[in-house]
């Protein structure tokens, strides 16, 4: 049996008694680009941090995260460093805060190489400049000597990307990598991300709330709501036939019928409840038009298990 | 507009602070190469005089030149300040960084230990040390330094906690930076501004504490002049020579003001939220 690149089982993150991530399970194969979508506060960023072993110290993380067959949960940071190597890297949303404001950007990229590849200072420097060129920044050797505040948002995000890809990672987790950028810059960065991930044959876990972005970049899709994965499948399949009412709602909320200002703004009724106040049974039932007594008491399982398109719902949307 | 006003106000405070602190430093430096009179030289015919051409700030009841006493006293003030703040930050900063970057148990244990230290005022520590080793400049410096450790530990911990949750620290940890290199390269530079500001404020407090300890006879012993003891000696002659306590008092007040203003100004200059992008 082929070992999945990343296998997450029953991943749960608690703050005190409140569960922010409630039993997330999924697996990623090598070379596959997967999107993880959901609204703000549904636990998607926390899931990413928990996978990376970077959840806040106030959080309790349980469950299992296997990366290249090795369990990561419950390991001390020293071992985590060894197991992750720089084969599991991350790009955060905000390019300003993702760079150390007091370190030249070239040095920051070189740091990545020095920690893991045990590259010498000179070699790390040369490779850092190559990486700056790879992310298509002009005048790499001069750019390497700049501080983050001397670069624009898009340029910074390119540096962040260079850092994430420096060690030739097997899996790149990108947490809303373009949300903080201008629309035009967003497109550039996405294009770059897409090219690089394909060139380097890196798996991608793209976290976003933007359906069109995920649709244009990813092959697989995970839909998250209330700290759990409610639907999983191939992007084309899920978009063509969304089974979970939440996915269907998201889908219709982000598509336009008229573009002359007469279109109704479609929304999903209500908003995401705060952590710890999700309803029992089905987490979505208080906002779902199909909810009944079954949804009240029985948390739905993801079915059919192992099939290419799974959904956790008692009343999946029918497409007949 | 407001930003610029704020910046200018910060500049003014900073320069005033710097000028006052610089003045004290120059006084101490000058005292090494030139003193109008010896610190122990007495002039029995001229006691308790007011300011004059011979004695710029007058003489004390023993006939010693007050200007000389103040001039040489600035050395003690600066020396005690530097060493006390040095002790406090060299212990407090690593302790605070440890607490701020560790899990709950280490954090709680360390900070409660700091609370215990914090419960001892500098004066009490100085009395304990003086009882054991005799009052001296050294015991005063150690007492003030130890009593200030928790202040540095707390402020460093708070700043560290904040920096530890920043994305760049998470990124650095994701590619395997941890332990001392993480602290020294990523956390320390980013919390340095907070520590520098605290150091200048702590310096002001140390000056006051030293003056208080010397006033109580727990600090620097005669004949080495200090502002605190000059003040205490002047107390006895308050009604004979009312100007006597003014000089050391003004010296203490101005240098404390100087370090406080410097701290304020530095905070404005180094605070990243006020800094121009």
Image: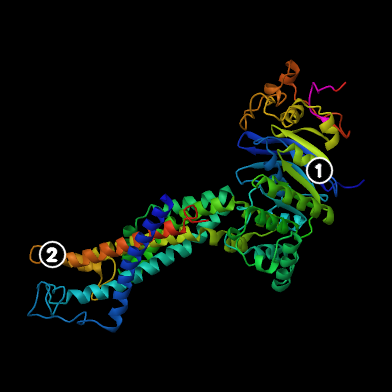
Observer-nearest of B176 and B13: B13
Quadrant where the N terminus of chain A lies?
top right
Residue topped by disc 2 = B236
In the image, is residue A264 above or below residue B78? above
| A265 relative position to B10: left or right | right
Magenta stretch bounds: A310-318
Q: Is mark 2 on a helix, strand or loop?
A: helix
Rendering quarter of residue A132? bottom right
Q: Residues within 10 Å of mark 2 (few under 14, many from 20)?
A: few
> Could you confirm whether marks 2 and 1 are on the same chain?
no
Residue topped by disc 1 = A218
Residue A254 visible? The answer is yes
In the image, is residue A39 above or below residue B34? above
> Which chain is indicated by disc 2?
B
> Which chain is indicated by disc 1?
A
Residue lying at 76% horizontally and 55% vertically, measured from the top left? A83
| A166 relative position to A55: left or right | right
Q: Residues within 10 Å of mark 1 (few under 14, many from 20)?
A: many
């Amino acid at each position: 049996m082929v070992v999945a690149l990343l296998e997450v089982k029953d991943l749960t993150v608690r703050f005190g008694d409140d569960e922010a991530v409630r039993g997330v399970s999924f697996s990623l194969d090598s070379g596959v680009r997967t999107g993880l979508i959901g609204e703000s506060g549904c636990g998607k960023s926390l899931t990413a941090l928990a996978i990376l072993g970077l959840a806040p110290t106030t959080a309790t993380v349980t469950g299992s995260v296997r990366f290249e067959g090795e369990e990561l949960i419950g390991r001390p940071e020293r071992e985590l460093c060894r197991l992750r190597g720089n084969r599991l890297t991350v790009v955060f949303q905000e390019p300003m805060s993702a760079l150390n404001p007091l370190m030249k950007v070239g040095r920051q990229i070189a740091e990545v190489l020095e920690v893991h590849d045990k590259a010498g200072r000179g070699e790390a420097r040369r490779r850092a400049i190559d990486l700056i060129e790879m992310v298509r920044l002009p005048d790499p050797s001069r750019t390497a000597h700049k501080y983050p505040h001397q670069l624009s948002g898009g340029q910074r995000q390119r540096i962040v990307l260079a850092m994430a890809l420096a060690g030739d990672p097997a899996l790149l987790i990108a947490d809303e990598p373009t949300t903080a950028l201008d629309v035009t810059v967003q497109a550039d960065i996405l294009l770059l991300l897409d090219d690089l991930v394909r060139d380097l044959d890196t798996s991608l876990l793209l976290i976003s709330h933007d359906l069109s972005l995920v649709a244009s970049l990813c092959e697989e899709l995970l839909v998250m709501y209330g700290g759990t994965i409610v639907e999983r499948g191939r992007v084309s399949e899920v978009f063509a036939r969304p089974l979970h009412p939440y996915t269907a709602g998201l889908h219709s909320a982000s598509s336009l019928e008229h573009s002359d200002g007469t279109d109704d703004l479609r929304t999903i009724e209500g908003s995401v409840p705060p952590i710890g106040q999700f309803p029992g049974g089905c987490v979505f039932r208080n906002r779902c038009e199909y909810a009944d007594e079954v949804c009240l008491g029985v948390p739905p399982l993801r079915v059919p298990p192992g099939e290419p398109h799974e959904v956790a719902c008692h009343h999946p949307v029918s497409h007949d | 507009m407001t930003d610029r006003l704020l910046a200018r106000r910060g500049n003014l405070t900073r320069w005033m602070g710097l000028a006052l602190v610089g003045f004290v430093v120059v006084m101490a430096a000058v005292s090494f190469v030139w003193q109008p009179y010896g610190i122990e030289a007495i002039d029995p015919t001229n006691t308790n005089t007011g300011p004059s051409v011979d004695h710029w700030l007058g003489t004390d009841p023993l006939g010693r030149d007050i200007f000389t006493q103040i001039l040489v006293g600035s050395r003690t003030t600066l020396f005690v300040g530097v060493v006390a703040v040095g002790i406090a930050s060299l212990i407090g900063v690593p302790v605070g960084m440890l607490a701020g970057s560790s899990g709950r148990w280490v954090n709680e244990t360390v900070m409660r230990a700091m609370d215990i230290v914090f419960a001892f005022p500098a004066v009490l520590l100085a009395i304990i040390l003086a009882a054991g080793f005799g009052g001296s400049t050294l015991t005063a410096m150690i007492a003030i330094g130890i009593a200030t450790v928790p202040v540095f530990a707390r402020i460093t911990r708070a700043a560290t906690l904040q920096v530890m949750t920043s994305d760049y620290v998470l990124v650095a940890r994701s590619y395997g930076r941890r332990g001392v290199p993480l602290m020294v390269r990523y956390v320390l530079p980013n919390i340095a501004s907070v520590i520098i500001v605290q150091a200048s404020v702590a310096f002001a407090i140390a000056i006051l504490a030293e003056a208080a300890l010397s006033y109580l006879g727990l600090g620097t012993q005669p004949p080495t002049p200090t502002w605190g003891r000059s003040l205490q000696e002047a107390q006895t002659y308050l009604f004979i020579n009312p100007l006597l306590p003014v000089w050391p008092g003004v010296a203490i007040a101005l240098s404390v003001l100087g370090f406080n203003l410097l701290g304020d100004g530095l905070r404005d200059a180094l605070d990243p939220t006020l800094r121009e992008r």
